[in-house]
Amino acid sequence: MERIFYPATQRRLRADEHIRELTATVRLSHKSFIQPLFVDEALTSPRAVKGLASVQVDTIGSVLQTIESDLKNGISKFLLFPVPANKSEIIFDFSFATTVVKRIKDVFGDAVWLSADVCLCSYTSHGHCGILNKEQSVLLNGETVNVLTKYAIQLANAGADCIAPSDMMDGRIAAIRSALNAFGHDTVSIMSYAAKFSSQFYGPFRDACHSSPQANVLKNRKTYQISPFNINDAIASALRDEKEGADILMVKPAALYTDVIAKLKQQTIKPVAAYHVSGEYAAIESLAAQNLLNRDAAHLETWAALTRSGADIIISYAARSAKNWIEQASI
Ligand code: PBG
C-alpha cells in the first residue's frame, strides 16, 4: 500500500499521554482553589443540599471537622456563607456569622485563609440581597451599603482574611474599603463579586441558604444583578470595582461566562476568580448520576476551560477533590 504523508499533521502531538502532558497549555493546581462552606445556625446536625453531592450545610461544630478534612486534602482557602436562624427586614444581627468566623480562626489560625460572603439575602425575610422600600418594589442602594459596611467591619474584627461582597449594590467596594482602613483592617482584602449575573444557576445555593427572592412586588434580582445579555455592563462593573479598591475580581457564574472572564482578564492586572456556581456544579452531578459522563473528568474539563479563558482562581464545590483528581487525571 502506498504510504501517504500529511505534512500538516497535528496528531503527533496527541499520540500518547506523555506528549499530551508535555504540550498542555493549561496546568491545574489545587492551590488555586477556594472551597465554599455553608453554616446554618438553625441546624442541630449537618444537612445535605439538593443537587450538591459532597457538599453539606454544616453546624458551627461540624464545620470545624469539614475544614480539618479539607486541609488534609490540600484545601486551605474557604468562602464562608453563614445562615442565621432569624430573618428580618431592617435590623440584622450578625453575631452568628462573627461567632463562626472567630471559631474557625481561633481553631485554625493562619492555616486557613477565610473569606466571608457579605450579602443580606440569607438575613432578609423576603430573600433579597438588601433593604427594600415599604412597597417591596425597590432595593434601596444607600441603606443597603450602610448595613453591608457594618457587617464587613464586624467580620474583619472577628478575623476574616477577606471580605467578599455579593450584593451588587453600587459603591459598596469603596464604602467597605474605606471603612476597613478606618478600623485598622488595611490588610484585609476584598474579593468583589464584580461581574455577577442574574442567573438561573443559583438554585441549589438558594436552597442551602433559604435565599430565594419572594417580595410582594420585586420577584427577581434583575434590578441589581447583571443581565446575561449585556457583557458591557459586566466589564464596566468589574473595572469600577477595581477602581474602588477590590483586590480580586470575580466572574459568576463561570462556565457559561468564559467570554467575560477572557475579556476582563485582558483589561485588568488584578487576579480574576471564576465561581463555578451551584447549578453549574449540579448539572455535572446530575449527568454523572445518570452515567452520562465521568464526573471527575467533567469537572477537570470545566476547570481547564476556566483556566484557559484566564481565571487565576477557581471557586468550586468540588475544590476538596481537586488535588486527588488533578494528580490522577489522565490528560
Ligand atoms: C448571594 C449569593 C448567591 C450566590 C452566592 N452569593 C445567590 C444569589 O445571588 O441568589 C450563588 C452561589 C451559587 O449558586 O453557587 N447574593
Image (cartoon, rainbow, N blue to C red):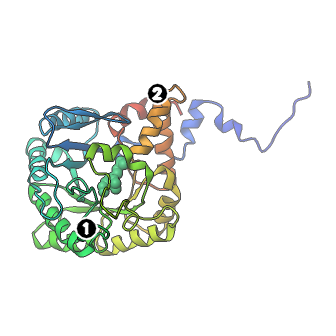
In the displayed structure image, the side of residue 320 where residue 60 appears, left or right: left
SS for tag 1? loop
State which quadrant residue 222 falls in: bottom left
| Residue 83 on image: x %, y % | 19, 48
Q: Is residue 89 above or below residue 10?
A: below
Q: Is residue 142 above or below residue 211?
A: below
Residue position marked by numbered label 1 in the rendering: 132
State which quadrant residue 151 falls in: bottom left
The amino acid sitting under disc 1 is Leu
| Residue 71 on image: x %, y % | 23, 36
| Residue 226 on image: x %, y % | 43, 65
In terms of sequence position, does the residue under pointer 2 or pointer 1 come before the other? 1
Residue position marked by numbered label 2 in the rendering: 289
The amino acid sitting under disc 2 is Ala
What is the CA distance from the residue labelled 2 to the residue labelled 1?
40 Å
State which quadrant residue 292 falls in: top right
Depth check: 219 or 305 in front? 219
- Asked whether mark 1 lies closer than 8 Å to ligand 1, one says no
| Residue 281 on image: x %, y % | 42, 41
Mark 2 in CB contact with mark 1 (< 8 angstroms): no
Residue at x-position 50% and y-position 52%: 256
Rendered-image quadrant of the C terminus: top right
Depth check: 196 or 156 in front? 196
Mark 2 or mark 1, which is nearer to you?
1
SS for tag 2? helix
Q: Is residue 123 above or below residue 186?
A: above
Circle 1: is it few (<14), some (14-19), or many (20+) Cα within 10 Å? many
Task: Give the total of numbered labels.
Answer: 2
Q: Which mark is residue 220?
A: none
